Image (cartoon, helix red, strand yellow):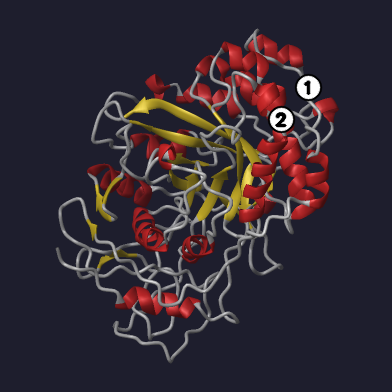
């Protein structure tokens, strides 16, 4: 195979090493029912942020081990490889299901930060005592579980491209779990948000990812989005993710998919709602019509985007890319999703145009009218013994993440397009608005001069034209970077 050229990537990452000129991404905030990307200029208002993302867990959650010295965010070679592929795809957000809080993630999170990619982290894992057991929530909600959750928070709280945390994923998925689990999930969220308030330097959103069970949808949504006693409380979700596989490529449309019901359920949302998983694979290759016609079409006034399931090929056969021995090949699904994301146009919405949320008082009767067996109990369990002390004083975790220099980093892996053409020039495109303002002119440069015109931000209605690099590598103009570097940035968000 033709080896990947390293020079362009080394040049870009060398520039990122300048500590006095590099700026990290702005942390996402929440205003009413929308995510907000703040402006760097405090005189300007922020803009509504829509998630154009994928679920990202190469190796699958089953490949995780708490005794291993690696996880999905510990291999910087793989993160450079994937940051490139995700940029070319048009992604601005990824969701990661399982991480090890004891492992350093600085390089990978810094690589994704440089690439303009936000990250949502699930705080749980499939292992014992590392998640809330839906069949036994009372005993699994314990000191050891919450200590690990807090360690996850510590490990990621200082990364500016951390969008938020998921407190749980599909914990409520049948009648039994719907009856027993809801109060424990809100208790976990309460503890997480109190820990963040006491131990982090910014507010970090915490939300829940709900199962694709239509009968439970409304009750689950009402339960997590309301305020106990009509007052703001820490146990309420800051955002709500819905795993939805109702629209299947080639057989579904707006009328048959049930998307109109999603619109009616969430039309008066008081917190951001998005698809935390979507992309039915009943028919392959997937064409992802639900992206342009659904999420960024008929649902755009209700949802805040979504995350396609999933990035890499695993046992469930949803992969956009195939990774073998570290080398990556883009599948036809990747190409089809790339086209969909390229064609998405979203109205530019200022934060000042977003309505403030009204306080939604919890109503047990209303929730039970949606699902009679739902445990709409708002008397939440107290924090387990010792947890209040952890919330107040912290868990003394020495693994506190931070953005670091990634100078000289390159990937050893090969990348191939779906048509079999190998990528010959892997360059992570950098948005100068938040990533870099000047270059180290002493860096070793071997690429030609490139300039690019300024472009839109997260919600621009302007579609950016593409030019092709040497091996079909797509570059999108995003802003002027020094003439010393041959990089143009993708309009990701």
Element assignment for label 2: helix
For the residues bearing labels 2 and 1, Cβ distance under 8 angstroms: yes
Q: Is residue 476 above or below residue 136?
A: below
Q: Position of residue 113 (x, y in %)?
A: 51, 63
To which residue does mark 1 refer? Answer: 378
* Front one among 394 and 268: 394
- Mark 2 and mark 1: Cα distance apart in space: 9 Å
Q: Which dot marks residue 5?
A: none
Residue drawn at the location 44% of the way across and 79% of the way down: 14
- Residue 337 horizontal/vertical position (percent): 32, 45
Q: Which residue is mark 2?
A: 186
Residue drawn at the location 70% of the way across and 34% of the way down: 188
Residue under the point 69% across and 29% down = 141
Mark yes or no: residue 224 visible.
Answer: no
Q: Earlier in the sequence, mark 2 or mark 1?
A: 2
Tell me the crowding category of disc 1: few under 14, some 14 to 19, or many 20 or more residues within 10 angstroms, Cα based.
some
């Amino acid at each position: 195979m033709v080896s990947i050229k390293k020079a362009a990537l080394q040049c870009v990452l060398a520039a990122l090493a300048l500590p006095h000129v590099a700026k990290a991404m702005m942390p996402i905030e929440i205003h009413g029912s929308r995510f907000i990307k703040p402006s760097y200029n405090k005189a300007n208002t922020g803009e509504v942020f829509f998630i154009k993302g994928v679920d990202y867990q190469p190796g699958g959650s089953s490949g995780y081990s708490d005794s291993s010295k690696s996880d999905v965010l510990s291999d910087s070679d793989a993160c450079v490889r994937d940051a490139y592929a995700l940029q070319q795809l048009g992604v601005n957000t990824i969701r990661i299901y399982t991480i090890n809080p004891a492992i350093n993630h600085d390089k990978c999170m810094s690589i994704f930060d440089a690439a303009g990619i936000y990250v949502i982290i699930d705080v749980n894992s499939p292992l014992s005592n590392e998640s809330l057991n839906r069949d036994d929530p009372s005993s699994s909600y314990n000191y050891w579980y919450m200590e690990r959750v807090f360690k996850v928070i510590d490990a990621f709280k200082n990364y500016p491209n951390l969008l938020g945390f998921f407190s749980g994923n599909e914990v409520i998925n049948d009648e039994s779990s719907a009856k027993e689990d809801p109060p424990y999930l809100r208790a976990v969220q309460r503890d997480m948000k109190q820990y963040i308030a006491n131990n982090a330097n910014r507010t970090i959103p915490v939300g829940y990812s709900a199962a694709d069970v239509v009968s439970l949808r409304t009750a689950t949504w009402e339960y997590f989005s309301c305020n106990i006693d009509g007052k703001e409380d820490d146990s309420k979700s800051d955002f709500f993710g819905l795993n939805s596989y109702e629209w299947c490529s080639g057989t579904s449309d707006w009328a048959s998919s049930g998307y109109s019901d999603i619109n009616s359920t969430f039309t008066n949302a008081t917190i951001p709602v998005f698809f935390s998983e979507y992309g039915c694979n009943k028919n392959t290759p997937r064409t992802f019509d639900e992206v342009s016609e659904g999420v960024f079409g008929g649902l755009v006034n209700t949802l805040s985007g979504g995350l396609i399931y999933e990035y890499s090929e695993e046992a469930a056969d949803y992969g956009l890319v195939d990774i073998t021995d570290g080398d990556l090949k883009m599948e036809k699904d990747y190409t089809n999703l790339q086209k969909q994301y390229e064609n998405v146009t979203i109205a530019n919405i200022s934060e000042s145009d977003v309505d403030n949320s009204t306080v939604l008082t919890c109503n047990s009767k209303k929730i039970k009218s949606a699902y009679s067996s739902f445990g709409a109990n708002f008397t939440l369990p107290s924090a387990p013994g010792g947890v209040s002390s952890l919330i107040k004083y912290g868990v003394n975790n020495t693994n506190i993440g931070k953005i670091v220099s990634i100078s000289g980093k390159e990937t050893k892996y090969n990348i191939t397009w779906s048509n079999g053409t190998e990528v010959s020039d892997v360059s992570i495109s950098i948005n100068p608005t938040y990533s870099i303002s000047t270059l180290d002119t002493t860096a070793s440069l071997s690429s030609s001069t490139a300039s690019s015109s300024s472009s839109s931000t997260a919600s621009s209605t302007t579609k950016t034209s593409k030019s092709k690099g040497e091996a079909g590598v797509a570059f999108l103009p995003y802003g002027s970077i020094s003439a010393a570097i041959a990089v143009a940035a993708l309009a990701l968000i």
